[in-house]
Structures are given as structure tokens and as C-alpha cells.
């Protein structure tokens, strides 16, 4: 069985930046998981004593607090900055952008629509910058239920969503409301990884998507691969691999989410190469 890696996969700019910040800071605590990859979080804890806090209330007495790549709600950030804690902001610049857009456009009287998962930490953070709140939707069906107060609407997207689904949202709004400002805030690395995964899945007869199972961008990659290759599987470590997936297969495609480090990818590819098919 041949193993083929996607043309584009793995760590994005924002994650590389956050990991470097954490490694250089040491003996710090992150507000929420720094990235959505448990294996890498464990490595940072074991090698650099970077711990994970789940709420800012746990930051009392902490010397250094690193803001996760997904960002945190505006009020939480303001509270931390007023405390005695040294705050190091590792929020991805691609996430900071929709935060700034929401704040600016809501100040100018626009109602805010965020295309994304309301429970995702990135979206919670972005929503907190909309002065009068925001409408968070994941589909046109959800959008149809929203009752807008006026005709001025600004739209942003969670950075890891599918562009095709974002276009469905914007097209729906543009044909129904007088003034719609569209800001495509999907990350470039997301575009590249998704396009590469799509092309790989078209030719492979089994695809392994490597990444955190709570990672939005990894789940999107898995969803795309499933569209073109039904035998597509999401794994976090080599322990998740099932030899039966590869029986009778001739080409195994491998891709990875933006929070997946090379050392995990290499470990899993090595394990796949050992499986007898």
C-alpha cells in the first residue's frame, strides 16, 4: 500500500506562533487549551511546564498567563490585564481580525452575523466584541429564523469553516437585505489544507485525517474527505488506527489539521507503514 501526504497539511501560522510563544515563556499557564491537540498540550506541559487553566478565575496567583490561539471573551481579557498576572497574548492574528471587525461594524450600527459554532471558543471570543450581541448561525436554515431589526448587516466567519457554506450564508443575506457587508475571515491555511485534502481524497481509497477530535478545522477536513472517499478516518494518535481500515487498499492518503505537529504525523505515518495489508 502506498502512503501519500496531502500537498498542504498540519501546523498553520497561528499555531506555530502560539507554540513558539509557549516554549519561550515556560512555567506559564494558558487560558483554555492553547490549541486543540491533546498530544501537543501534554508535550508543552511535560517539557516546558506550561499548564492549562479552564477559566480566568483559576489565574489568581499565576505569574504568567498565555491567551489561547482562539482568543477569549473581551471582558475576560480586560479582567486579566487589570490583574497582577503578566498576560502574553497568543491569539492568532487571523482570529483577532473578526474580533476587530465585529467591534467596528457594531459601533457603526450594523447587526452582526457570525457563521460558526456558537459553542466554539473562537466564536465566543469574536461574539463578545459585538457591542449589541451577534447572531451566530451554522446554516441557512438557522439564518431563516433570525429576525433582524434593520437592513444593515455585517457578516464574518469562524476562521476554519468551509468557504462553500459561508457563500450560502452571504448569498442568502445579499438577496434579502439592503446593505450587507461581507468579510471573508476564513484563514488562508484553512483554504489550502481543505483544497489539498479534497484532491487527495479523490484519488485515495482510504484517508487518515490526523488531529484533535475537538478541533473544528480537523473535523472540517474529515468531512471534506468523507465526501470523496467514504473510508476516511479521524485519529488523534497511532493508538486510534484500526488495521481493518487498510485491508485491500492500495493508496492511503494522509492529511492533518492546523493544530497537528509534525512529530505526531510522522509517528502515525510510521505506524501505518508497518500495517500488513
Image (cartoon, rainbow, N blue to C red):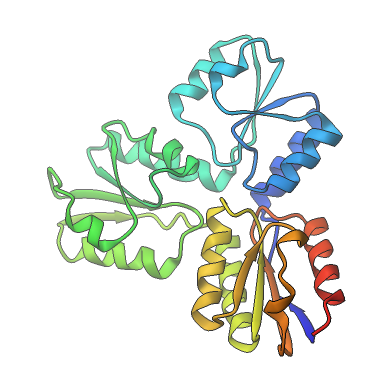
Answer above or below: position of 241 versus 264.
Answer: below
Q: How many marks?
A: 0
- Direction from residue 26 to residue 212 in the image, left or right: left
- Direction from residue 162 to residue 111 in the image, left or right: left
**x and y, in percent, of residue 60 in the image:** 61, 11
- Direction from residue 88 to residue 76 in the image, left or right: left
Could you tell me which residue is drawn at 69 percent across and 41 percent down? Answer: 18
Answer above or below: position of 39 versus 62.
Answer: below
**x and y, in percent, of residue 33 in the image:** 62, 37
Out of 206 and 125, give the one closest to the viewer.
Answer: 206
Could you tell me which residue is drawn at 83 percent across and 56 percent down? Answer: 263
Answer above or below: position of 178 versus 112.
Answer: below
Could you tell me which residue is drawn at 81 percent across and 36 percent down? Answer: 23
Q: Quadrant of residue 5?
A: bottom right
Picture quarter with the N terminus: bottom right
**x and y, in percent, of residue 123 in the image:** 43, 43
- Direction from residue 205 to residue 78 in the image, left or right: left
**x and y, in percent, of residue 133 in the image:** 28, 35
Can you see residue 100?
Answer: no
Picture quarter with the C terminus: bottom right
Q: Quadrant of residue 180?
A: bottom left
Out of 270 and 175, give the one closest to the viewer.
Answer: 270
Can you see residue 155?
Answer: yes
Q: Residue furthest front?
A: 244
Could you tell me which residue is drawn at 79 percent across and 57 percent down? Answer: 264
Amino acid at each position: 500500500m502506498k502512503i501519500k501526504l496531502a500537498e498542504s497539511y498540519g501546523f498553520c501560522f497561528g499555531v506555530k506562533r502560539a507554540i513558539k510563544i509557549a516554549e519561550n515563556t515556560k512555567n506559564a499557564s494558558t487560558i483554555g487549551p492553547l490549541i486543540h491537540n491533546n498530544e501537543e498540550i501534554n508535550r508543552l506541559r511535560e517539557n516546558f511546564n506550561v499548564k492549562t487553566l479552564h477559566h480566568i478565575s483559576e489565574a489568581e496567583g499565576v505569574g504568567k498567563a498565555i491567551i489561547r490561539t482562539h482568543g477569549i471573551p473581551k471582558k475576560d481579557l480586560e479582567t486579566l490585564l487589570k490583574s497582577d498576572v503578566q498576560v502574553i497574548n497568543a491569539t492568532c492574528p487571523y482570529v483577532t481580525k473578526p474580533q476587530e471587525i465585529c467591534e467596528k461594524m457594531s459601533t457603526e450600527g450594523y447587526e452582526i452575523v457570525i457563521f460558526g459554532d456558537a459553542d466554539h471558543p473562537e466564536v465566543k471570543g469574536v461574539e463578545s466584541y459585538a457591542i449589541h450581541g451577534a447572531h451566530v448561525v451554522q446554516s441557512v436554515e438557522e439564518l431563516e429564523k433570525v429576525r433582524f431589526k434593520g437592513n444593515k448587516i455585517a457578516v464574518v466567519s469562524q476562521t476554519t469553516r468551509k468557504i462553500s457554506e459561508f457563500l450560502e450564508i452571504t448569498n442568502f443575506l445579499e438577496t434579502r437585505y439592503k446593505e450587507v457587508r461581507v468579510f471573508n475571515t476564513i484563514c488562508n491555511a484553512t483554504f489550502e489544507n481543505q483544497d489539498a485534502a479534497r484532491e487527495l481524497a479523490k484519488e485515495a481509497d482510504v484517508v487518515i485525517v490526523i488531529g484533535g477530535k475537538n478541533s473544528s478545522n480537523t473535523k472540517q477536513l474529515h468531512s471534506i474527505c468523507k465526501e470523496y472517499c467514504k473510508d476516511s478516518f479521524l485519529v488523534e494518535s497511532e493508538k486510534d488506527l484500526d488495521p481493518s481500515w487498510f485491508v485491500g487498499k492500495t493508496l492511503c492518503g494522509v492529511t492533518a489539521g492546523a493544530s497537528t505537529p509534525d512529530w505526531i504525523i510522522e509517528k502515525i505515518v510510521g505506524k501505518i507503514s508497518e500495517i500488513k495489508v
